[in-house]
Image (cartoon, grey):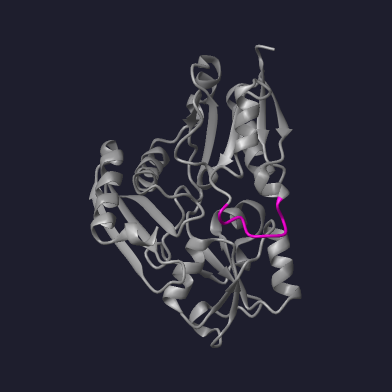
Amino acid sequence: MHNSLVIGTRGSQLALWQAQFIKNQLERHFPTLEVSLKIIKTTGDRIQNRSLVGLGKGIFTKEIENALLTGDIDLAVHSLKDLPTELPEGLCIAAIPAREDPRDVLVTDTGMPLEGLPEGAKIGTTSPRRKAQLLYIRPDLRVVDVRGNIDTRLRKLRETDLDGIILAAAGIKRLLEPEIITQFFDTEQMVPAVGQGALAIEVREGDDRVEKLLLPLNDASATAEITAERTVLENLGGGCQVPIGAHAKHVDGELSLIGAVCHPDGTRRIVESSIGTPDTAQHLGGVVAEKLRNSGAAELI
C-alpha cells in the first residue's frame, strides 16, 4: 500500500522501543500513514552463549538489511553504533534523529563509583572498547563478559558476584529510570562508541517516497556529529568489536571531535582531538583519524 510503511527491527526490548519511537514520530507527522513493525532475528541475537568478538561486522544488522533489499520492509531502525561504516550496495542512511546521551555509565548495587570499588573488583561488559578503557583507568579490575539485554545484565549484577556493570546511558534513559545509574563517565575519560546514543534509519537508495517521509525526523546536529565519528572509524578500518571510540559535540557553533584507540588489555591508550565546523564534519573526522595513525593507532587495531 502506498500509504503504509513496514519498519524492520531486532526484537530486544530496546530495539522495539527505538522502532516504536520512530513509528510514533512518523505517525505524528503523517496522521494517515499506516506504520507497522516487523521483528527480524539477527546473528548477534542468536548467539547468546559466547563472545561476539571475531565474528565480523554487521552481526546485528545483516539480516535486517537483507529484508530491506528484498522489499520485505521499507526501512530499518538501528542503534547507530551497531551499523558498519560500509553499507551494502543499494542501501543508505536516510535520517538520524536527535541524539540521546552518548555517555557510558557504571551501575553498582552498592552505589559505589569506580574509584571507590575495592581492588580487583569484578566489572561486567561485552565491549572491547569499554574493557580496554576501564583497564586503562584501573588495571587492577577484573573485567568479564556479560551479555544480554539491559534487564538481564541488571539481574546478573544483583544475582552474581559482579561489583558493577557498564552500560550506555541512552539505553537506560530510554527504558528505565536514570536514578539507577551510579556514575556517568566523562566522554574524555571513556570515549564512547561511534554513534552511541543515536539511531540510524536505513532505506533503499532511490526510494524517494520513504526518504521524503523521513525528512522531518532528521536532526542536522546529530548528523554532523555522526558523520565526523563514522569517518574516524572508516578511516581507521575498525568496527564495534575493536577498542576504538570517537565522540563529536557542538561547542559554541563549532564541532569538537575526540578519538581514542586502545590496546585490548588497556596498557596503552591513544587519544587525539580537533575542532572544525559542522559543515566540514567529514574532513574533521579525517584529521583526527590521521592524528591517531601518526600516534601509532595502527599498531593497536
Could you say which quadrant of the image residue 158 lies in? bottom right
Q: Quadrant of the C terminus?
A: bottom left
* For residue 197, side relative to residue 65 (left or right): left
Furthest residue toward right: 159
Residue 259 seen in render: yes
Furthest residue toward bottom: 119
* For residue 147, side relative to residue 256 (left or right): right
Where is residue 86? Give x, y as percent: 45, 36
Which segment is the magenta one? 47-54
Please tell me which residue is depicted at 58% across the width and 82% down the height of the picture.
121
Residue 27 seen in render: no
Where is residue 1? Give x, y as percent: 70, 12
Asked if residue 266 is positioned above or below residue 93 in the image, the reply reads below
Please tell me which residue is depicted at 26% across the width and 38% down the height of the picture.
280
Callout count: 0
Asked if residue 20 is positioned above or below residue 246 in the image, the reply reads above
Magenta span: predominant SS is loop
Where is residue 242? Give x, y as percent: 47, 56
Where is residue 213? Give x, y as percent: 54, 21
Which is more toward the observer, 153 or 175? Answer: 153
* For residue 11, side relative to residue 185 (left or right): right
- Decide whether residue 77 is among the magenta residues: no
Which is more toward the observer, 167 or 59? Answer: 59
Could you say which quadrant of the image residue 224 lies in? top left
Please tell me which residue is depicted at 60% across the width and 45% down the height of the picture.
59
Please tell me which residue is depicted at 61% across the width and 26% down the height of the picture.
68
